[in-house]
Every structure is written in C-alpha cells, then in structure tokens.
Image (cartoon, rainbow, N blue to C red):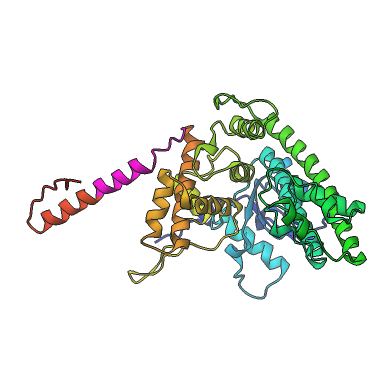
C-alpha cells in the first residue's frame, strides 16, 4: 500500500509555535519555510514586531501560543494586529515533550502538534469585551481590598472594646460610618456618639451608648484612622471605576430593551433599574429576569463572556467549557468517575452562587433546587442547578428569548404528573392497568 504524502496529513501546514517566556520567546516555523526554522526573540515591542515580520515572511498564517502567566498577552495582541490567526493553547495539552526538555524543543513540539491539528484554542472574547472585563476585574479587586480594610477597622474597634457589631448589622452603614468618623475626628463621649444612631436601627439608644463605652488607646485609634483613610481612598477609585464601566457599557449598548416602567428618579430602585437597562441594552435581553441572577452575577457573566456566544456550537459545549457537565471517565465499559472537574472559571462561580441563593425562592427554579437537595447532597444539587442556569443564559443570549418564571406551584404539579405517568408505566410493565382517583380532602 502506497504511503500518503506528509502534506496531506497536515491540518495547518503553515503554522508556527511559540514558547512564551518572561525574558525571551522561542519561535518555530515549518522546516521547509526557511533555512533557520527556530529563532529567539526578545520581549520588547520592537522584538515582537520583528517576530511578526519574520512569521509573515515565512508564509505563516496560524500561530499556536502557549498560555504562560500574563507574558502571552502582548505577544497575542501584536500578532493579532498584524493579521495572524493566533491560537491560545493550554500548556497542559502538550506538556509531554519527547526527549530532553528545552525551550527550543518546546516550540518545535508545539508547532508540530499545531500542524497536525492536535491542539485546541482557548476561549478569548472579543476586544471590546476584554476592555470591559479588565475594568470589571479591577472593580472586584478594589471591592475585596475595601472589605479587608473594613475588617481592620472592626478589629481596632473590638480591641478598644467598642462593640458596634453587637448593635449594628452593617458597621459601614449610615450609623456605623457616622460613629467611626466621629471617633477618628476626636469624639470620645458615648452619649455624643450614640446621637448618630439612625431611627431605623433596631437597637435602643441606651444599648448603643453602652456598646460605645470602651478603652480609647492611641495605637488602636491610629490604626482605625489609617484604615478609614484607606477605605475612603479605595471608595474614590471605585467611583472612577464605576464611571468608566458605565461609559464603556453605554457605548456597547446597541439595542433598546423595554424593562417596563422606571421607578422614580433619585431612588435606590432607580439606580438598580438604570444598571439593568444598561446591561440589557448590551446583551439584548434582561438576564436578571432569571431567578437567582442579580445585577452582580449578570455583570460578571457579561463582562467575562460578552453577549456573543457563537463560539460555542451548542449549549452542551458551553456548559462543558464552564465545567458544569458530568465527567465521562469510562474504561472497559465501567464508569470510573462522573464528577465535574474543578475549575476557577469566574462565570461558573457566579452561577453556583446564584444557584445557592435559590434555596428559599418560591420560583420554579427554587423548587427544582430543593427537589434535588432531597435526593442528593447539596454540592451536587448546587452544581446541577448552576448547569440549568447556564443553559437558560445560553438560550437567552443566542435566541433572544425572554425568561418567564412558571412558578413553584406549576412546577410541583408538573412533577406530580410525571410521577403518575411513571407509576402507570411501571404498572403496565408488570401487567397491571391503574387509574388513579383523587383522594377527597
């Protein structure tokens, strides 16, 4: 039998492989493209442009890039701007390099696997979504930092035996902030500090006064003032970040989704409504209509993915990428494991948090989550519910469908009818015919 030509076996004959590093990048092109198929380039912008020139001169049209830290980002962006098709590849797909491991062998092995079509490109959203994602992630970092300084303020207060947490549910609420700022300004009288108590606080003025009687030590007051200053500084950066996010989202909103009548201007509900409107205009649908998905979760989903999910062929591909599908480890006809894989995917985490919030919801999704909890452990029920939420998000974004909650009562009635149908099938398989009649109340 005649052997096939080597060129017929190649899926990407004009591909290159790049082993990304912090101080240099090793690039390999096909052997017949140039006399020197492996070259090293530096990390500077001029070096990256020289790399792109050499790849184009070598006839390369597709580049496989190893995802190493954040060093791959400038290489990816420069090559993409020069018209090359860049594949971001997970390093785990080609970690078994034959022979002794080196940077030269790594890029050659990467180029060979790419040319044979053995690699898969990782998900990377479009440029506009990447901009929104960067700002949104920065906002999350600022929120986490701000929360850490709130904890430091609470620690300083407890060390002075100022028990604000015993009388206030939110230390950084209206009353808590007023009291802390008065303490930093020099006020020490518990009765004077208790006058900042808001009328909505459930604890009495006497109890608040008692909680504000403490030991005013200079070192703890100094730490408290420093922590408050850091809290205010981060709040200023958060305001700038929110303004930047709103400007970016308004520019991306190409549609006008009708969310109904807007609340009165200046109210807290109006702020939430405006935020929903901006996200809905960008996505084309209002994802907050799905039970469990609030503004924070929807913002996380859209900023990480964007509204265009055409990269995923089916909803199964999407849920598999999120790590919400059961595993398929089978050997010899025996299922070795069906657990979902561990993943740090931010969208997955947001969906699992949303699923957890459905435990007391009177919606159909809440009834679905509680039914799963009755027959399996809560972590698995949480993952299954997150999988259901992911399917709803996919269908809303790809089909433009609106989500309509059918309610807990209708869901439970559907489950009842399914149970009756299952009993009938079971009886028929045993040779019986049953006609259930309702029991009088």
Regarding residue 234, the answer to whether it shows in the image is no
The stretch drawn in magenta includes residue 416: yes
Q: Is residue 403 above or below residue 144?
A: above
- Residue lying furthest front: 206
Rendering coords of residue 411 (x, y %):
34, 44
Q: Along the horizontal axis of the image, is 272 left or right of 207? A: left
Between 29 and 271, the one nearer to me in the picture = 271
Q: Determine which quarter of the picture holds residue 362.
A: top left
Q: Is residue 93 above or below residue 244?
A: below
Q: Along the horizontal axis of the image, is 312 left or right of 148? A: left
Between 184 and 125, the one nearer to me in the picture = 184
Q: Along the horizontal axis of the image, is 179 left or right of 267? A: right
Rendering coords of residue 103 (x, y %):
72, 67
Q: Which SS does the magenta portion mostly show?
A: helix
Q: Along the horizontal axis of the image, is 260 left or right of 246? A: left
Between 283 and 419, the one nearer to me in the picture = 419
Regarding residue 303, the answer to whether it shows in the image is yes
Residue at position x 75%, y 45% in the image? 174
Residue at position x 72%, y 66% in the image? 104
For the image, the number of numbered tags is: 0
Rendering coords of residue 318 (x, y %):
50, 48
Rendering coords of residue 51 (x, y %):
77, 51
In which quadrant of the rendered image does the N terminus lie? bottom left
> Magenta stretch?
402-418
Residue at position x 61%, y 34% in the image? 276
- Residue lying furthest bottom: 100
The stretch drawn in magenta includes residue 177: no
């Amino acid at each position: 039998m005649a052997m096939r030509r080597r060129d017929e076996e190649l899926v990407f004959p004009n591909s290159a492989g790049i082993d990304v590093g912090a101080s240099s990048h090793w690039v390999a092109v096909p052997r017949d493209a140039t006399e020197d198929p492996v070259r090293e380039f530096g990390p500077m912008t001029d070096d990256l442009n020289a790399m792109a020139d050499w790849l184009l001169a070598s006839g390369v049209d597709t580049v496989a890039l190893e995802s190493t830290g954040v060093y791959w980002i400038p290489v990816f962006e420069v090559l993409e701007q020069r018209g090359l098709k860049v594949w971001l590849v997970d390093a785990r797909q080609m970690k078994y390099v034959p022979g002794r491991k080196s940077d030269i062998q790594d890029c050659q092995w990467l180029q060979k696997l790419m040319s044979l079509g053995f690699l898969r490109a990782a998900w990377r959203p479009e440029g506009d979504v990447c901009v929104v994602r960067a700002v949104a992630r920065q906002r999350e970092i600022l929120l986490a930092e701000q929360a850490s300084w709130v904890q430091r303020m609470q620690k300083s207060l407890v060390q002075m035996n100022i028990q604000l947490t015993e009388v206030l549910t939110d230390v950084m609420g209206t009353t808590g902030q007023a009291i802390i700022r008065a303490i930093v300004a020099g006020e020490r009288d518990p009765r004077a500090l208790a006058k900042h108590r808001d009328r909505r606080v459930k604890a009495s003025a006497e109890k608040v006064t008692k909680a504000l009687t403490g030991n005013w030590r200079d070192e703890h007051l100094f730490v408290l003032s420093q922590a408050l200053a850091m809290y205010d500084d981060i709040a200023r950066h958060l305001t700038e970040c929110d303004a930047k996010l709103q400007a970016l989202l308004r520019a991306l909103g190409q549609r006008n989704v009708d969310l109904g009548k807007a609340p009165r201007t200046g109210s807290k509900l109006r702020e939430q409504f405006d935020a929903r409107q901006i996200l809905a205009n960008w996505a084309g649908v209002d994802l907050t209509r799905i039970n469990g998905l609030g503004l924070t979760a929807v913002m996380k989903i859209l900023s990480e993915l964007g509204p265009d999910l055409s990269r995923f062929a089916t909803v199964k591909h999407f849920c598999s990428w999120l790590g919400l599908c059961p595993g398929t480890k089978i050997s010899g006809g025996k299922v070795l494991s069906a657990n979902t894989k561990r993943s740090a995917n931010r969208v997955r985490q947001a969906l699992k948090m949303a699923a957890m919030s459905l435990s007391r919801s009177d919606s159909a999704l809440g009834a679905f989550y509680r039914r799963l909890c009755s027959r399996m452990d809560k972590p698995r029920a949480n993952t299954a519910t997150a999988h259901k939420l992911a399917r709803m998000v996919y269908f809303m974004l790809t089909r433009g469908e609106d989500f309509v909650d059918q309610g807990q009562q209708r869901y439970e009635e559907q489950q009842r009818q399914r149970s009756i149908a299952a009993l009938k099938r079971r009886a028929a398989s045993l040779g019986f015919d049953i006609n259930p009649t309702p029991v009088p109340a």
